[in-house]
Each structure stands twice: as structure tokens, then as C-alpha cells.
Image (cartoon, rainbow, N blue to C red):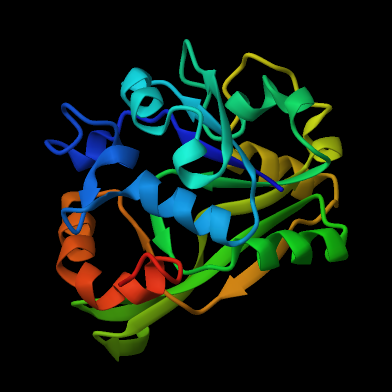
Amino acid sequence: MHAVILAGGRGVRLRPYTTALPKPLVPIGEEYAILDIILQQLRSYGFDQATLAIGHLGSLIQAFVGDGSKWGIRVDYAEEETPLSTIGPILNFLDRLPEDFLVMNGDVLTDLDYLALLEHHRQAKAPLTVATYQRQVKIDFGTLETSDGRITSFVEKPTLAYGVSMGVYAMSRKTLAPYPRNVPFGLDDLVLDLLARGDLPCSYDFGGYWLDIGRPDDYDEANASFEKLRSVLLPSGEAQ
């Protein structure tokens, strides 16, 4: 039961909050760092090992998490000397991982059942499983289609729905083994290569709570709603 937490990004979109802190350590609800919540959740689902891929301000993450004993999880680290995108860092420590493992961004707040995702991946025998979420976006304009200079359809301020990646994945060593190490390689590169080879990834549709804390507005929303979501996000016993 091994999880990889991607915590090496610079958090540029979340500045000024990330000027002095790496994004996984920004506080939520004045009591917890995002990474604290994630580690509590992982342990509650039975994960007993985690590898943190660190880079920008990684020493602060190491000082905060240590060996993981506070959460009952054995934690080790893999440090990026240069940015390697989403999948690139994992390729450098692939031999330390079991055949099937969880990968997640270190800035995600969700009540997703991580164990259920990993079990779904194993049962599907998929090369990759992506946790997906339906987002709705309200368009503030009338949208239209044209043909030969004529308007053929018109919708006033529609709401568009589309599936997005939650930044949480289940992966297998045999899928990643063929790719080269020490070069930038993103999830988009992996998915497009799998699609081109006809080795289709699996989706794991989720309808609970999910927030990717990428921008100041997202961070403000997370803090504003944390008290209402405390019992959802924190394992039983920590939510009191």
C-alpha cells in the first residue's frame, strides 16, 4: 500500500502564499497543512508507505513530515534537481515501488476513497487509472455557431460540463518501465502515448468533494468552507 505524493512544484499560480512555503504546506483552517490532511487520509485507507517527490522548498517538507511516524506511515523522499513534470520524477525511483501504487498531487483536497481507486485499477488491469470529476462552467456570453457567414445555432449563457483529471491516479510499474529516466515526462505525455498504442487508460468517476488548490481563489474557498467540510475531509477521530 504505497502512495507517491508529487510535492515538487513551485506553486507559481498560488503566489503570494507560496513565496515562503511550498504549496503542500499552506495551512487549511488554521490547523492543518494540505499535506497533513492527505497523510491522515492515506493512513485511514490503509496506506503504510509514501514517497514524497520534492523540489522547490523541499527541505521544509522534509522538516514537517520527517519519517512519517506522526501519521503511522513510513515516508521516504526523492528530490528533483531539475523539474521533471508529473511522471518524470517517478521514473527515477520506480524500483522502490510495488507493482500497483497510488500517485497524487500534493495540493488536492478531496474525500475520494484512495483504496477503492487502487482496487478498481487492479481489477480493471488497466495501464493507468485516472480519477475523474465533472466540472460545470457557466459561460457569461451567448454562444453561437456559424456556417458560410450565417448563424446556425445560438444558446444564451449556457453551462458546459466536462470531465477533468483530479490529480489522483493509480499506476503500474510495468506501464512506466519502458520510459527513459531523467527527462521531463508529464501525465499528458503518458496518456497520449498510451492512446496512440491503443492501450487505453481507465477512468474512475467520482462525484464527492474535490478541490484542486491551484489559485488564490481556490485557496480562499478551501479555508472558507473547511469548518463545514472538516468531518468529510478528516478521518474519524480527527474531525472532533
Q: Above or below — where is 84 with respect to 197?
A: above
Q: Residue at x 69, y 17 (%)?
A: 181
In the rendered image, residue 76, in percent from the top left (x then y), is placed at 57, 26
The residue at 35%/24% (across/down) is 63
Q: Which residue is at a point 82% across and 29% down the rendered structure image? A: 177
* Front residue of 191 and 63: 63
Instruction: Indicate the position of residue 223 as horizontal and vertical percent values.
Output: 18, 61
Q: Note whether residue 56 is visible.
A: no
Location of residue 11 by image quarter: top left
> What is the number of callouts on the image?
0
The percent position of residue 58, horizontal first and vertical second, equals: 37, 22
Where 17 sits versus 89, above or below? below
Q: Residue furthest top?
A: 81
- Residue 47 seen: yes
- The residue sitting at 85% across, 51% down in the picture is 199
Residue 199 to residue 16: above or below: below
Name the foreground residue: 215 vs 224: 224
**Which residue is more in the foreground, 39 or 140?**
39
Q: In the figure, is residue 99 to the left or right of 6?
A: right
Relative placement, left or right, of 56 versus 41 is left
Q: As drawn, is 127 to the left or to the right of 34?
A: right
Horizontal and vertical percent position of residue 106: 43, 43
